[in-house]
Image (cartoon, rainbow, N blue to C red):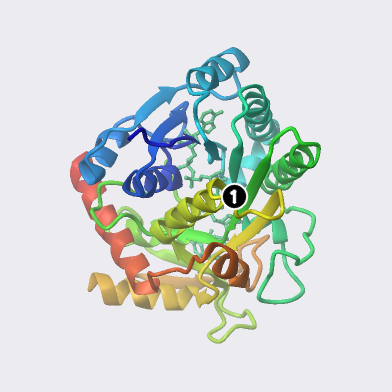
Amino acid sequence: MTKTKIITTGGAGYIGSHTAVALQEAGFEVVLIDNLSNSNEEVVHQIAKITGTTPRLEKVDLCKEQEAFACFQRHQDAMGVIHFAALKAVGESVAQPTRYYHNNLVSMLHVLEAMQKHNIPNLIFSSSATVYGQPDQLPVTENTPLQEAASPYGQTKQMNEVMIRDAVHAGEIPQAISLRYFNPVGAHDSALIGELPIGIPNNLMPFITQTAIGIRKELAVFGGDYDTPDGTALRDYIHVMDLAEAHVQALQFQLEGKQNEKYDIYNLGTGVGSTVLEVIHSFEKTSGRKLPYRIVDRRPGDVAMIYANVDKAAKSLGWRTQRDLDEMTRTAWKWEQYAREKMGS
Ligand code: NAD
Ligand code: UD1
């Protein structure tokens, strides 16, 4: 039986590679389109070690019109596109806004144009909780009003959502789903794939694991005077494999014709917030290591608390997270050790 083909743009990256595993395990044929600007082609072999199947990798820059269109033409039999490809570093986007607008908007335009041209019927988009800014009410639902994005990166997510919504409403694309991820962390249990940030990490979990392994001296905890249970900021961390499985369920929902709204939005989180100290304590428990940390001033631009209401994804997609905070810190640590060992550092 021929498998249903799915294109994943940015499929060699952190979330894309975990989703490729989940898609292959669910019986899909997966094509990764990636320019490898923030990933490595070796990931296809790692995916093959986990699933027994090597996904096809198309080394293509989606901003290059000819390249992008030729690639979609080769895969015009695909039934869906999951669009992960983007630049994603918030601080870098403030320093290099034009590069971010160019990459994240032009690649999106080319995906929409190519899907239209080849009648590829389903789109799933990687959006972010960053679109909510500092919400007035918690937990945030999909109807919580969006705030002015705090960074060019956040602006591109809001703009991408608008581009998709308008294309769907005009009938250019039959149906699409935006998935607003909260804080993805952790790695596949095999430790064959994971997140490997370039340079000094901005995000909490890679900073914790790099500190524990000795690359960083200590973790700076940004702010101890927030109005939260222990004074440190609170986020909705979600295991990357739970996130990956949500993509499979969203796609199956589309393919089975269950999507009522032609353009739909889902929050993806656990629905439970954890403070920075809770994450540290979980890490210390699952790794058996003491983590050196110090509470310092708040990081400019940070919100005190944000966590998701995930009822909509549970009700419509039948999706629920399976993995708790300890599983997130355990797999993040396992991956850090594996990755360092492999790189010989
Ligand atoms: P990642 O950087 O690991 O993966 C993105 C991939 O896209 C990379 O492999 C990169 O090489 C590729 N890419 C970038 N520009 C491209 C282009 N022009 N053409 C082809 N390939 C290109 O990032 P990730 O963490 O896996 O994030 C995936 C998506 O999820 C992104 O859209 C990101 O904005 C979004 N997101 C991520 C997080 C997070 O915390 N990781 C949170 C919310 C939303
Ligand atoms: C950041 C991005 C957001 C993106 C999300 C997931 C900003 C303003 N927002 O969110 O757009 O969608 O990552 O990739 O950058 N912390 C420390 N010490 C550290 C690092 C982080 O205490 O060294 C704290 C932060 O203050 C925050 C929490 O840990 O309270 C999580 O931080 P981080 O992983 O950077 O994610 P967000 O800030 O939630």
Task: Give the residue drawn at x 34%, y 29%.
Answer: 41
Q: Quadrant of the C terminus?
A: top left
Task: Give the labeled residue for mark 1.
Answer: 257
Residue 127, position as x, y percentages in the image: 62, 50
Q: Secondary structure at mark 1?
A: loop
Q: Quadrant of the N terminus?
A: top left
Kind of residue indicated by mark 1: Gly
**The quadrant where residue 235 appears:** bottom right
**The quadrant where residue 213 appears:** bottom left
Residue 9, position as x, y percentages in the image: 50, 34
Please, is residue 81 above or below residue 129 in the view?
above
**The quadrant where residue 227 appears:** bottom right
Residue 200, position as x, y percentages in the image: 44, 48
Decide which of 77, 88 is in the foreground and name it: 77
User: In the image as oriented, which residue stretches furthest toward the front?
Assistant: 1
Task: Give the residue drawn at x 66%, y 61%.
Answer: 300
Q: Residues within 10 Å of mark 1 (few under 14, many from 20)?
A: few
